[in-house]
Image (spheres, rainbow, N blue to C red):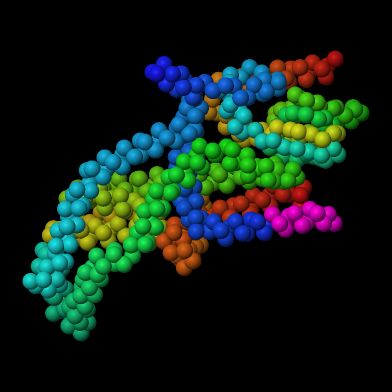
Amino acid sequence: MASKLLLWFKRLFTAADAHRELLRYFLFKDLTSHQRALVAGFLHNREFRAGESVFERGNPLEVIYFVESGEMEVSPLFEGEGSTVLKKNQFIGVLDLFSGKKRLSSVKALTDLKLKALSVDDLQEMLARDPALGVKLLQACCCFLGGYIRSRIH
Amino acid sequence: MNWNRLIFTIIILAACILAFIFYRPLLMYLLLSLVLAYFLDPVITWMEYKRVPRWLGTLIIYLVILGLLAWLIATYVPVLIREGNQFLDLLGRTDRPLLQTILDLPGFKSLHEFVESLDHSVPQMGLLTRFETFLETAVTKISEFPQLLISNYQSILGTLAMVLMVPIFSFFLLSDKKSIRRGMMSLVPNKYFEISLILLKKVDENVGNYLRAILLEMLAVGIMSTIALGMLGVPYSVVIGAIAGLTNIIPYIGPWLGGFIAVLVILFSGMPSVNILWACIAMFLVQQVDNYVVYPAIVGKTMKMQPLLVILTVLAGSYFGGVFGMLFSVPLVYMIFSLLTATQKYLKEFRII
């Protein structure tokens, strides 16, 4: 009986990992289940129809979007470049985070789109409150930006 | 024009209005629950980051508060009951007029003598007659007090229900904070999603900071009043200090209430009437420290409003909502003002207007 109670109590703190799907996103790949649960609490589900605008270049940056399903078109950052298509498990907004909190590109849904949205303010709150989580997210951000710069050079 | 969309919007609006009318009696409970939730949220969020689930954190905080309340009740209620019974015995005496009994109390006796001497010096003002008429009216009101309790039992039960319901509502607001927020945001169209997030965050921050600052100010005034009155030897200085702290949230009017209760206690306890003067000076000093040190340092940072506008808002609040109106009118007006300013700014930045 006592062991059953102990097990029940232990399960309260180590509940089944309900947020494993977040591991699909590069930004969250190193987070523990508790950290993923914290992040999941701040994620909003959004749905866009094909052709609908997600955001416009020059808008204030408030949200990082993670693609759950569908495709979206990102307008070129520089003149002479083609537009980029973002698919399932990719995300947008991290680059804008380091560029004065303004959107650098416009994004439009190519197909019906399901996104998860994370507010930048909530992200900053998490970084401030949980330094370990902050280090992991910033490491992931740096890796992502490094990959982006390499791709631009090549 | 998309007629289906228009009809659906009208149905939603109608449902919202009906829901408002249906749940209107509970709005005050909800408002108070929100206030309690704002007070407790920082601790529960801190615990959440330490791996304590929100529901468990809320439960732990509730147990701590209950423990504190139980200790306070065990310490002070027996004394209050004893004093209350003595007071009711005094009211129930039939062998002599109640006014005479009260005038025999040392505090009232010396006050009566003081007014009498003033009346002799300036007889044209009829000070003594006015003082005795005032006392008679006050005594009549006090003797009606037990009857008042019986005839208003419905209001008393209502207040008790509120005392029980508010923590229950707050529990759900605290433990389901994130899902409530997600639910609210899921109703917002995509075009307004980001701006709504910003505004929600702004309201959350403004209201939370203001309420927590007010709580800190209440605590500071309560502690300072308790120390000041305790040094003067006024009985029940902790209870009077707590009342002074609590009433202090009503701008401009509240601070006088604590001092008024201290004066009443001195009058009834038989302390020398010169202590009334000392108590008034002590409470005045507490108010000065609050106005010039505590308020600017804690509350002033969270809200900037013209003093005249604050007074007008408090008066309008009392006209529309009594004591609760006085309590919530200033933060509400400030919140609406800052929300409108921010909305205009972000609507322009998002190029919606």
**Residue drawn at (13%, 75%) of the image:** B116
Q: Residue B251, how many percent across, how many down? A: 41, 58
* Quarter where residue A89 is shown: top right
Q: Can I make out residue B205 in this image?
A: yes
Magenta span: B1-12
Dividing the picture into quadrants, the one containing residue B333 is bottom right
Whether the magenta-drawn stretch holds residue A115 is answered as: no
Q: In the visual, does B4 lie left or right of A3?
A: right
Give the overall secondary structure of the magenta segment: helix
Task: State whether residue B288 appears in this view.
Answer: no
Q: Does residue B127 sit above or below B165 in this rendering?
A: below
Q: Residue at x 35, y 39 (%)?
A: B65
Instruction: In this rendered view, identify the residue nearer to me: B84 or A74.
Output: B84
Left or right? Give the position of A26 relative to B68: right
Task: Please report the residue visible at 73 percent of the width from the left and 55 percent of the height from the top.
Answer: B9
Residue A141 picture location, percent across and down: 68, 22
Q: Is residue B322 above or below residue A45?
A: below
Quadrant of residue B200 within the rendered picture: top right
Q: Quadrant of the N terminus of chain A?
A: top left
Coordinates of residue A108 in the picture (x, y in percent): 83, 36
In the foreground, B181 or B43: B181
As drawn, the residue found furthest toward the right would be: A80
